[in-house]
Amino acid sequence: MVTNITNLSRSGLYDWMLQRLSAIILAVYTLFIVGYILTNPGLSYAQWSELFTQVWVRIFTFLALLSLVAHAWVGMWTIATDYLNSRAFGEKSVLIRFPVQLLCFIALFSYLVWGTQVIWGH
């Protein structure tokens, strides 16, 4: 049995569910931010800063950040395994797919660390 260490859950169904759940969280977060901007015309830095001093907004933002990273990873993994693992690349497809996945992992992890510092830093 061949195992794949680059997908999140080792199950296509769980990855599919994770991507759908993360999409819902991202949609709700987007509606919240757009709604806040539309209901506060002439939004100042002080108002924006005040919004993000509230703990529930920080938690919601962090949840949206985690959802974005998970959503991007599942999507990237699916594209990489579907298109970079094709017969066109032959037996050496792992030599192409793995560096692409590694680069995406490093970028997503960096975004997660940086975003966490922005959200929770002082």
Image: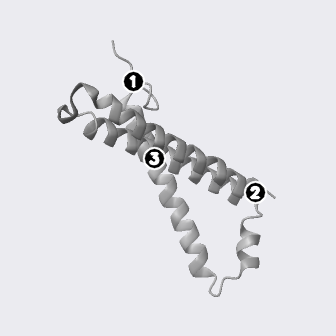
Circle nearer the viewer, 2 or 1: 1
Q: What residue type is labelled 3?
A: His
Observer-side mark, 2 or 3, equals 3
Q: Is residue 73 left or right of residue 63?
A: left
Q: Which residue lies furthest to the left in this view?
A: 88
Report the residue marked by disc 1.
Answer: 4
Q: Would you name the residue on which mark 2 appears?
A: 55
The first of marks 2 and 3 along the sequence is: 2
Who comes first in sequence, dot 3 or dot 1? 1
Residue at mark 3: 71
| Residue at image coords 42%, 31% | 7
* Quarter of the figure with residue 42: bottom right
Q: Which numbered circle lies on residue 32?
A: none
Q: Which amino acid does label 2 sit on?
A: Val
Task: For residue 21, say whether it is visible.
Answer: no
Placement of 43 over or under 120, stated as above or below: below
Q: Residue at x 58, y 52 (%)?
A: 65
Q: Check disc 1 and report its element: helix, strand or loop.
A: loop
Label 3 Cα neighbours within 10 Å, binned few <14 / some 14-19 / many ≥20 = many
- Name the image quarter holding residue 98: top left
Query: Does residue 116 appear in this view?
Result: yes
Residue 39: % across, % down: 60, 81
